[in-house]
Structures are given as structure tokens and as C-alpha cells.
Image (tube, rainbow, N blue to C red):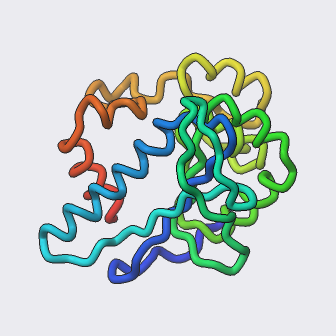
Amino acid sequence: MPNPPRSSPSRVRVVELLTFPLVQLLDVTGPAQVFASANEFVLESGGRPPYELKVVAQGGAQVTASAGLKPSTQSLPQEGSLVDTLMVAGGRGVEAAAADPVIVDWVQMRAKRARRIASVCTGAFLLAASGLLDGRRAATHWSHCAELARRYSKVRVDADPGADKPRLSRAISAGCIHGKRVSKLTSKFLAR
């Protein structure tokens, strides 16, 4: 899947985080806070915030997360709008999202414009359903790796992607555990 040219460092990078009913709330708020913290660190050093986060959902409808809270969302952006990073959250609702042809088509369309594509936890199932992981190495929550491999045989599922990297935090909750240090390291990595 060819990626568009890298974003200019002076341009704000649009990050779209796809949500759906019964999304795992931490899969939305964790990445949102990482990008917000990256913006804060850049502001503190006199720069312009590099990221614009858009939490999106089909129809712009407010979704109810598995925790019962309703994160604010925008409509799915149209084909021609700019996107640097496409992220797909996970959660119990990913099964329904992966079976929805409108969402799958949208993910495929936005992936063509995005420089980076990522999923959080079981969001990998939606990327796999969209064909975006075919022939690629992918990971998901450890308790879902076998199911991802069973359903999507073209995906090279890595059940333990950090096994050779003992300092690598492999869960969205790592941001809660490691806090500000992880946010700083992540902002430096994402700014590349």
C-alpha cells in the first residue's frame, strides 16, 4: 500500500481516530492524551502544536463506549480531506464495525491517503477485515492473537511483538503506568 509523501514538519498533522459503539474507552482516550501531550511539549518549547486529533464515527453520531461514556465525535471525513495518521480503536464493538461495509470501505479509502495507519488493541480486526494487514506483521491484544490469526490467514500475527525488547510497553495501559516519560518519548518518535 503506497503512502503519500511525508508531512512537512511545519504542517499540522491530522490524526483520525475511528470509534464505534462499544469502543474500549481507553483505546480512545489513551492515544488522544498522547497526541495532546505531544502538542503540549512542543508548545512548551516554543513551537506550534504538530497534531490535530479528530475522533470520528459513522454519521458523526455520538457513540457509547463499553464503559457507558459517550466521547464526542465528528463525522467520517470525506475522501479528499487531508489525513496524516489513521488510527482504529478496539473494543467489543469492533466485530460489528468490521462487518459494516460502510466502515470497511471508509477505512480502505482513508488508508490510501494516510501516511501512517495504526490500530489500538483489537482495532487490528477492523484493519484486517479491510485487507490492510494482508501480508503484513500485526499484533493485537494477547488474548485475541489466535483468533486474529485464525480469521485472517494472510496476516502474520505476532503474538509477542515485544519479546526481544524487554523495555517495550505493549499495552495501551502503559501510558497510564509510565505517564509523562512515555508521552515525551512518544512525541519525539511521532515527530519524525
Residue 68: name its quadrant: top right
Residue 166 lies, in percent from the top left, at 29, 24
Residue 154 lies, in percent from the top left, at 76, 36
Residue 109 lies, in percent from the top left, at 74, 65
Residue for point 52% across, 77% down: 5
Residue for point 33% across, 31% down: 174
Q: Nearer the viewer, residue 94 or 10?
A: 94
Residue for point 30% across, 72% down: 49
Is 141 above or below relative to 55?
Answer: above
Residue 147: name its quadrant: top right
Residue for point 46% across, 63% down: 53
Is 66 above or below relative to 5?
Answer: above
Is 123 above or below relative to 161?
Answer: below
Residue 43 horizontal side relative to residue 120, left or right = left
Residue 42 horizontal side relative to residue 141, left or right = left
Q: Nearer the viewer, residue 73 or 45?
A: 73
Image quadrant containing the N terminus: bottom right
Residue 90 horizontal side relative to residue 52, left or right = right
Is 128 above or below relative to 161?
Answer: below
Image quadrant containing the C terminus: bottom left
Q: Residue furthest right?
A: 101
Q: Nearer the viewer, residue 105 or 70?
A: 70
Q: Nearer the viewer, residue 103 or 72?
A: 72
Residue 54 lies, in percent from the top left, at 52, 63
Q: Residue furthest left?
A: 45
Residue 5 horizontal side relative to residue 9, left or right = right
